[in-house]
Amino acid sequence: MLALAVDPDYDVVHNNSLHHLPVAMAAALSVPMLTTLHTPPTPWLESAISLGSSGESPPSAPTPPTGGARASRRPR
């Protein structure tokens, strides 16, 4: 995270970690960070999110879809 904070070669950081530290340190980056959660957030991750929400651009979390995923076919 410290190296990313000073590296100008990145446009965005995509975080796939369940560790709370990248989320808590996201404000130190000069580029946006997107976090993808593949499981429900843990309590310590929720705490890190609330820490980051006091900044200029608060984190946002998409709402999980309701119902099951459906396959769709392209019209012929």
Image (cartoon, grey):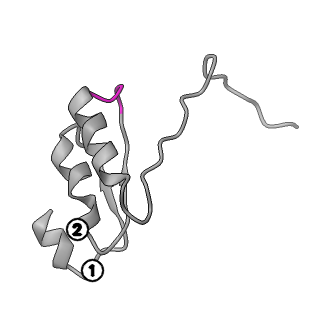
Which residue occupies the foreground of this view, 40 or 49? Answer: 49
Q: Which mark is residue 28?
A: 2
Is residue 18 placed above or below 66 in the rendered structure? Answer: below
The quadrant of the picture occupied by the C terminus is top right
- Residue at the image point whose x is 22% and y is 68% from the top: 28
Q: Is residue 58 left or right of residue 30?
A: right
- Amino acid type of disc 2? Ala
Nearer to us in this view, 27 or 8: 27
The disc, 2 or 1, on the residue closer to the chain's N-terminal end is: 1
Q: Position of residue 57 (x, y in %)?
A: 44, 62
13 w.r.t. 70: above or below:
below
Secondary structure found at label 2: helix
Tell me how far mark 2 sits from mark 1, CA to CA.
16 Å
Helix, strand or loop at mark 1: loop
Q: Which residues are magenta?
A: 38-42
Q: Nearer the viewer, mark 2 or mark 1?
A: 2
Residue identifier under label 1: 9
Residue 21: where, in percent of width, then height?
16, 48
Magenta: predominant secondary structure element? Answer: loop
Extreme-left residue of the structure? 2
Residue located 27% across and 80% down the image: 9
Give, as a three-letter code, the residue at label 1: Asp
